[in-house]
Amino acid sequence: MKLDGKEEDAKLLVKAKGNFQFSQAMEQIEEHIPKSLFIADKNPMKVLHKALSVGVHALEDDVCLKQATAVRIVLFDLSIRLREILKENSALKSAVLELDNIKDH
């Protein structure tokens, strides 16, 4: 798994995906989410859910707009992290294999 997880983590993520209650799904998988996705030691999906839930139910429009900007920034950073983690870097792999093949003296 490219996110440094275990096979069981992937299975739990797939299972949680079928849960329509986001908060319950997060409880099921929280300890299995790769730390490389965290931002400032916070689970960005949980932070986004909290901001969106509160905004939809109780906040004034101007506060929701401010939070929407923060949500955009977090989603943008999270997408960059995911892209970097998941991208295939054939040049880097080739370089590592080349160096690994160096014979000891």
Image (cartoon, grey):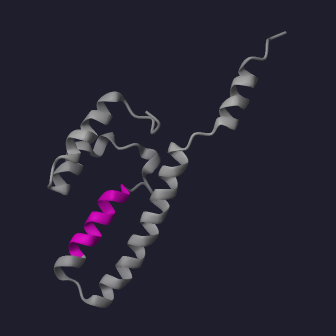
Q: Is residue 40 left or right of residue 105?
A: left
Asked if residue 79 lies left or right of residue 7, the reply is right
Judged left or right of residue 104, residue 3 is left
Of the 4 image quadrants, the one containing the N terminus is top left
From the top left corner, tell me how far across and down residue 94 is, in percent: 70, 29
Residue at figure coordinates x 36%, y 55% from the top left: 43
Residue 14, relative to residue 6: is it above or below? below
User: Which residue is outermost to the top?
Assistant: 105
Relative to residue 56, is residue 63 depicted above or below? below
Residue visible at 45% across and 39% down in the picture: 3
* Quadrant of the rendering where the C terminus is positioned: top right
**To which quarter of the image does residue 59 belong?**
bottom left
Is 56 placed above or below 3 here? below
Majority secondary structure of the magenta segment? helix
> Of residues 91 and 100, which is closer to you in this image?
91
How many badges with numbers are in the image?
0
Residue 42 percent coordinates (x, y): 38, 56
In this view of the protein, which residue sits in the foreground, 44 or 76?
A: 76
Residue depicted at x 28% and y 89% = 61
Farthest residue to the right: give it: 105
Residue 49 within the segment the image draws in magenta:
yes
Q: Position of residue 93 (x, y in %)?
A: 65, 31
Q: Which residues are magenta?
A: 43-54
Residue 8 at x, y = what percent? 29, 29
